[in-house]
Image (spheres, rainbow, N blue to C red):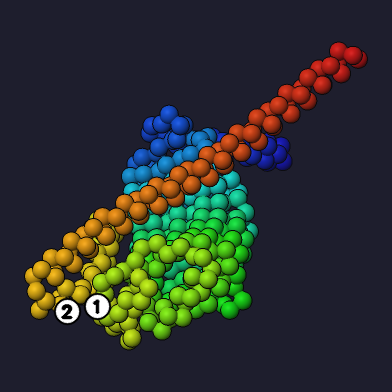
Amino acid sequence: MGSLLYISLLVLPYLPTAFTNPIECSRVQRNSSCFIEGLSFQTPSEEYSAVFPASAHIIIESSEILHFSAHLFDALAETAFLTLKGSLIPSVTFRSDELHSLRVDNTGLREFTVTPHENRNLNTLIISGNPLSSMPPSIRHLTGLSILDLSNNQLEHVNLNWFQTMDNLLVLDLSANRIARIDINPALRLARLKNFWVNHNQLHRIEFFPYFAPALRRVRLVENYWSCEWVAHVRQSIWSSVIQVYGAEYVCADKVDGGLCCYEDRPVNEANRETEQVSAGEFRWRTEQLPRAERLLARDDDAERSQNSHLRQSYNVLEQKYRKLVEEKELLEKRFVNTVRELELTVKRLTAELTEAQDVIRSQNLKVNL
């Protein structure tokens, strides 16, 4: 009986390899990106035994994974860039010492958490187009982030103090959400933050702006419910800090101050911003414009209305072209960062292979000499 138990113990360590669930690429692009489509797990054992392909960039789409758990991230041993898009993945628990970039795009994400361990490897986190209403305090563990894009979700409140640990944060995009409040500690300093987008939200004011970001160079503020008192207060700070303000509003229901619509009393009609579900796990924004000045000036003569309309159309065309150029520039910057990361990984791999080859040659020379 003792011999049988001894043999069983010897066999047990080798059992997991017999129950692995290898996942294959549905297709591979020229840049070696691995696309995985139609992925789902019928049982917990399938999920726990999953082994992803050895690819630096994996894109999972048209799949159904109710919880992309920490052990699924563990199964991405050789992946630096992971994209989850166009799927049903309502919950994600992040844990990885290998990933440099994570993108979760239109997956019906409602819950995102980070395991309580400092992570300095993840450089880029993009969560966009999801019904996500809040971010957890555990995001503070992602101390290596330089790009954090949380745009086009349903966030209602953001605590910037959770980002204080992110010493390398350069870009923070909170645009196109439902954010009505941003909490900022007076002592908060995001020392390297250069781009701050909060346009298309429901903000009334941002305390300690722009002092919490001493290196800030570009900001987007349009389409909010700014207090006129706040706009007047921060305008001089923006000018003196040489901060570029992208986008402007010239026709407003109440007042316009320095290119921003502002209000003496905060609008209470929140029905102007509503979320419309278009398919399972996919949401889009329908933002109804505030009453425009042409309604208030309906009694003006036709010639004046025609002139204003022509000027407004010309401005909109120029602004769209300008925004497109800015977005293309930002996209190129992101691609550049990703390319640099890939080159770093390649250099590390080649260095390791070279070192290993040198060690083999040395050992062979020693054997010959002996």
Q: Which residue was labeled with disc 1?
A: 253
Compared with residue 206, is residue 366 higher up or lower down, i.e. above or below?
above
Q: Tag 1: residue type?
A: Ala
139 left or right of 280 in image: right
Q: Nearer the viewer, residue 37 or 171?
A: 171
The kind of secondary structure element at disc 2 is helix
Contact check, label 1 and label 2, Cβ < 8 Å: yes
Taking the spot 27% from the left edge, 60% from the top edge, the residue there is 315
- Mark 1 secondary-structure assignment: loop
Point out residue 121 in the picture as x, y percentages from the top left corner. Answer: 60, 50
How busy is the neighbourhood of tag 1: few (under 14 within 10 Å), some, or many (20 plus)? some
**Residue 11 seen:** no
Q: Which residue is mark 2?
A: 296
Q: Position of residue 286 (x, y in %)?
A: 24, 64
Residue found farthest to the right? 370
Residue 299 position by quadrant: bottom left
